[in-house]
Image: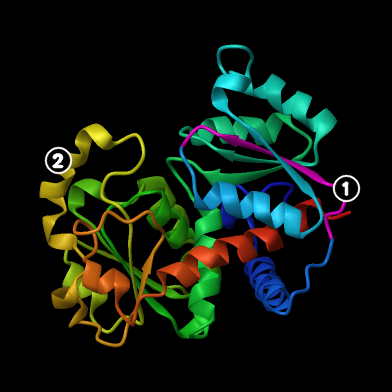
Amino acid sequence: MPKDFLTVADWSADALRALLARAAELKDLSKRGERPPTLRGRTLAMYFEKPSLRTHVTFEAGMTQLGGHAILLRPEQVGIGTRETAGDVARNLSRWVDGLVARTFSHEMLEELAREGSIAVINGLTDRLHPCQAMADLLTVSERQDLDRAVLAYVGDGNNVANSLLLAAGVLGFELRVATPRSHRPDAAVYARAEELARSSGARLLWSEDPREAVRGASFVYTDVWASMGQEAEADERRKIFAGYQINSDLLREAPDAWILHCLPAHRGEEISDEALDGPRSIVFDQAENRLHAQKAILERLLAP
């Protein structure tokens, strides 16, 4: 079993399915008012370079619900790269806590933290990947359709969410269609890795510039913001580039029975219309809730004695 959860590509299909099954079990237990203290006495450090609602709250609440404790570390407090190196921070934390969730701009920094530390490191988001979000997405999809039969269409920016969905599809073997402008395709190395994984799993991966082609007949339609954290200066230009990629009633005519996914926060009226986000096919808040349960399963797997 990997020491860390940096990317879903490091985990086998069986291991990911086991995590999803445990997440579903933990969700059911929680709804019955049962919270097994499987992480009693365990401590998770949380290092966030980027703003966070869902990642912060769900990891801290998840540790509490499992009987453990979480400590928030702010970048100005820790000073990676100014006060000390990422490696030294990782070696210090390894003497005090049982795990670290890091939400960073640089994926390379996350890899250094994992490489230099002896504790489990969990990717809470980097500019390249967002694997915990992908696990919540897969849990949400599996609650409505068997993953093997799911057809997921992602429309918008080829960002960290798109990259992680590609790797998840590659490992687990479901169909993923990605529609982005040619200038904003998913990371080329990530796409190549997903295709390599797909040769073993039988996943069908498709990229297109045409959102209608991607969405047509899909069972799930997914989008994310057009300008992610750190790209605020590009927001006006990106609105022009992505103008034809909005999830709205017109595009959804291509997939009238599709469930709608969004990892949030949403920029209403940009990548998704209010009608789509608030409509009866939207499951975005189920998806947000499932961050808690998917991450509790990951925490258990990595931190439980």
In the rendered view, does 62 fall on the left or right side of 154? Answer: right
Residue 86 against residue 61 in the figure, above or below: above
Say whether residue 173 is visible.
Answer: no
User: Which quadrant does the N terminus fall into?
Assistant: bottom right
Separation (CA) of disc 2 from disc 1:
48 Å
Label 1 neighbour load within 10 Å: few <14, some 14-19, many 20+ = few
Residue appearing at x 43%, y 81% in the figure: 150
Residue 48 inside the magenta-drawn segment: yes
* x and y, in percent, of residue 134 in the image: 50, 61
In the rendered view, does 78 fall on the left or right side of 88? Answer: left
Residue appearing at x 19%, y 54% in the figure: 181
In the rendered view, does 305 fall on the left or right side of 264? Answer: right
Residue 176 inside the magenta-drawn segment: no
Task: Find residue 131 and name its label.
Answer: none
* x and y, in percent, of residue 161 in the image: 41, 54
Picture quarter containing residue 207? bottom left
Which label's residue is closer to the chain start, 2 or 1? 1
Identify the secondary structure beneath mark 1. loop
Residue 135 against residue 90 in the figure, above or below: below
Residue appearing at x 60%, y 47% in the figure: 6
Picture quarter containing residue 273? bottom left
Q: Which residue is mark 1?
A: 41
* x and y, in percent, of residue 111 in the image: 60, 35
Residue 80 against residue 102 in the figure, above or below: above
Q: Which residue is mark 2?
A: 236
In the rendered view, does 25 fall on the left or right side of 255? Answer: right
Front position in the image: 162 or 258: 258
Identify the secondary structure beneath mark 2. helix
Q: Which residues are magenta?
A: 38-50
Residue appearing at x 46%, y 56% in the figure: 164
Residue type at tag 1: Gly
Front position in the image: 101 or 11: 101
